[in-house]
Amino acid sequence: MSERVTPALLGKWKSEGHRITALTAYDYPLACVLDSAGIDVVLVGDSVGTAVLGLPDTVGVTMDAMIHHSRAVARGVTRALLVGDMPFLSYHLSASQALENAARFLQEGGCQAVKLEGFYPQLVETLVDVGIPVMGHLGLLPQRVRLTGSYRVAGRSADERTTLFEQAQALERAGCFAMVLECVIPEPAGEITRALAIPTIGIGSGPHCDGQILVTHDMLGLNRGRVPRFVRRYADLDETIRRAVGAYADDVREGRFPVSHETYSEE
Ligand code: KIV
């Protein structure tokens, strides 16, 4: 479990049929847990906005916030490939803006790669050209939710499938080392996965992708907002924490904590 995961290793795993595990993290303690549990890819997702900052969507997440969270996560990750998510409008203004912000993830944030949501093959080429590994992201694009008005499954119509397929191939040609497919109908997600040499990492896109990613707070049951239907809950931390906090509050109110011999000293 000690070999550092790299973009090249993910490509090798795809060719060997070795499935990739990925989760999001936004802070140091969770990063330590995911890394020591052997998760292959840790994404500092712009889902930080909805998962921990209490925002209605990812549009309000800034570059400075992403760097702040990336730095914390990077301190806890030694094995996983650490990917920083380029937030809304951090790469749309110009190639130099995209380069500057992507470089911040590597230089300040401690990430090994960036993820770029949407179809921007020229920007991918520009970043890869200077040595910045880029993960693509097609299908449902949460950064566009204020335009689309809802979180809609992608790839329903034949036209949409063709577009997705062609965009995925173009992003691979532009140099992406992997591709997130979010909420793509399983059959086209499988077609794209079979057609690409780079691994696909699915979220709500069925079983045919080369790997899977979830928002960690969703799968741990620690999410006050919208939880997509495809999420499987592996824990109910909301309830676990509520019980622990309730027990603490009862102890304080009833005079059971602290007890008289306990002090602040560690001896
Ligand atoms: O921000 C995020 O967490 C993501 C994943 C849903 C892939 O982009």
Image (cartoon, rainbow, N blue to C red):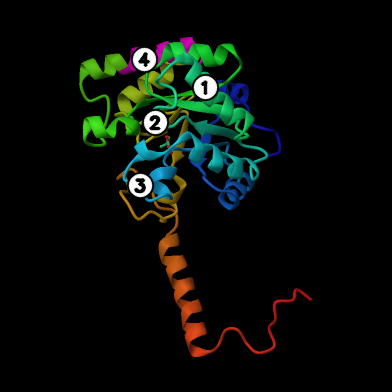
- Image quadrant for the C terminus? bottom right
Mark toward the start of the polypeptide (1 vs 2): 2
Helix, strand or loop under label 1 = strand
Pointer 4: what residue? 167
Mark number displayed over residue 88: 2
Residue 64, image x and y in percent?
51, 37
Q: Is label 4 or label 2 in front?
A: 2
At a point 48% along the width and 20% down the height, the residue shown is 97
In this rendering, is residue 85 above or below 31? above
Mark 4–mark 2 Cα distance, whole angstroms, equals 20 Å
Residue 185 is covered by the magenta coloring: no
Question: Would residue 35 be seen by someone viewing this image from the given angle?
Answer: yes
Q: Is label 3 or label 4 in front?
A: 3
Kindly report the secondary structure that dominates the magenta region of the rendered protein.
helix
Is 80 left, or right, of 66 in this rendering?
right
Q: Which amino acid type is marked by label 4?
A: Gln
Mark toward the start of the polypeptide (1 vs 4): 1
Please give the range of residues in magenta: 164-177
Helix, strand or loop under label 4 = helix
Mark 1–mark 4 Cα distance, whole angstroms, equals 15 Å
Pointer 1: what residue? 134
Mark toward the start of the polypeptide (4 vs 2): 2
Residue 259, image x and y in percent?
63, 87
Mark toward the start of the polypeptide (3 vs 4): 3
Task: Say whether marks 1 and 2 touch (CB < 8 Å).
Answer: no
